[in-house]
Image (spheres, grey):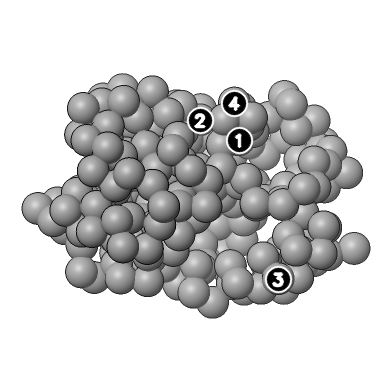
């Protein structure tokens, strides 16, 4: 997929007012208005919704199958980092670990350039070990300012070697060699179909059907209001 074409054609989707990082490499978090996309059809079954396409191949936390948060995030996005640090821990502890919802991560590297190789490393890591994937995802957001296009592979390998059980060199080599390209393209294709032009963006499902879209680094109460029952 041509990244410039994707960014040029994307429109923002969502019902909440806090915008996310906008595509195009600016990462400025400005407002990005747009038309309704294909993800706005409330009541669509999970299996028929573009956000849940290829769900079986995605990183998923939790055992719930009829209540999902499908998150489109970019490791380089500053508002994704805010969500990950302020809201994500409560989603895990109060919704995922209690069995009320599952959390699905989908990479959408459309902000700063280093998010693209980072997303490839994440997918290669997931192919090797799910626990290592979640650890690396947290590391990217926790140390976001330390990454750039020149160091992302080396820093990722150092972290994986010291903090996980995967063969770090093999994982990063796989990412460099394009072995994760297909997985990254699946998420980019889903993002394009949904018209996503900024991150983070979340698609919430409850009782097996789509409920609403949430845009930006929203607080826990926004997610709980839909999925907390």
Circle 1 is placed at which residue position?
A: 51
Q: Residue at x 67, y 39 (%)?
A: 40
x and y, in percent, of residue 35 in the image: 53, 40
Q: Nearer the viewer, mark 3 or mark 1?
A: 3
Counting residues from the N terminus, which is met first, the one under dot 1 or under dot 2? 1
Q: Nearer the viewer, mark 2 or mark 4?
A: 4
Distance Cα–Cα, label 2 vs label 4: 9 Å
Circle 3 is placed at which residue position?
A: 93
Counting residues from the N terminus, which is met first, the one under dot 2 or under dot 4? 4
Distance Cα–Cα, label 1 vs label 2: 6 Å
x and y, in percent, of residue 203 in the image: 64, 46
Distance Cα–Cα, label 3 vs label 1: 23 Å
Q: Are marks 4 and 1 in contact (CB under 8 Å)?
A: no
Q: Residue 190 bears which disc, if any?
A: 2
Q: Are marks 2 and 4 in contact (CB under 8 Å)?
A: yes
Disc 3: CA contacts within 10 A as few (<14), some (14-19) or many (>=20): few
**Secondary structure state at the residue bearing disc 4:** loop
Q: Quadrant of residue 179?
A: top left
Instruction: Residue 98: tell me if it is visible.
Output: yes
Q: Are marks 2 and 3 in contact (CB under 8 Å)?
A: no
Front residue (pair 134, 141): 134
Q: Quadrant of the C terminus?
A: bottom right
Q: Are marks 1 and 2 in contact (CB under 8 Å)?
A: yes
x and y, in percent, of residue 56 in the image: 64, 30
Disc 2: CA contacts within 10 A as few (<14), some (14-19) or many (>=20): many
């Amino acid at each position: 997929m041509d990244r410039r074409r994707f960014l040029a054609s994307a429109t923002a989707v969502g019902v909440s007012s806090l915008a996310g990082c906008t595509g195009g490499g600016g990462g400025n978090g400005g407002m990005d208005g747009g038309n309704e996309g294909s993800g706005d059809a409330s009541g669509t079954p999970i299996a028929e919704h573009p956000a849940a396409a290829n769900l079986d191949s995605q990183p998923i936390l939790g055992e719930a199958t009829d209540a999902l948060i499908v998150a489109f995030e970019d490791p380089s996005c500053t508002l994704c980092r805010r969500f990950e640090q302020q809201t994500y821990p409560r989603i895990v502890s109060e919704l995922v670990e209690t069995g009320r919802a599952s959390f699905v991560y989908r990479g959408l590297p459309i902000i700063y350039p280093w998010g693209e190789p980072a997303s490839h490393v994440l997918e290669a890591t997931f192919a090797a070990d799910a626990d290592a994937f979640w650890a690396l995802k947290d590391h990217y957001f926790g140390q976001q300012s330390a990454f750039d296009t020149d160091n992302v592979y080396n820093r990722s390998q150092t972290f994986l070697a010291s903090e996980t059980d995967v063969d770090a060199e093999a994982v990063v080599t796989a990412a460099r060699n394009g072995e994760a390209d297909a997985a990254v393209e699946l998420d980019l294709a889903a993002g394009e179909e949904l018209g996503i032009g900024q991150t983070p963006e979340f698609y919430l499902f409850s009782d097996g059907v789509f409920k609403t879209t949430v845009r930006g680094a929203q607080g826990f109460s926004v997610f709980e209001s839909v999925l907390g029952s």
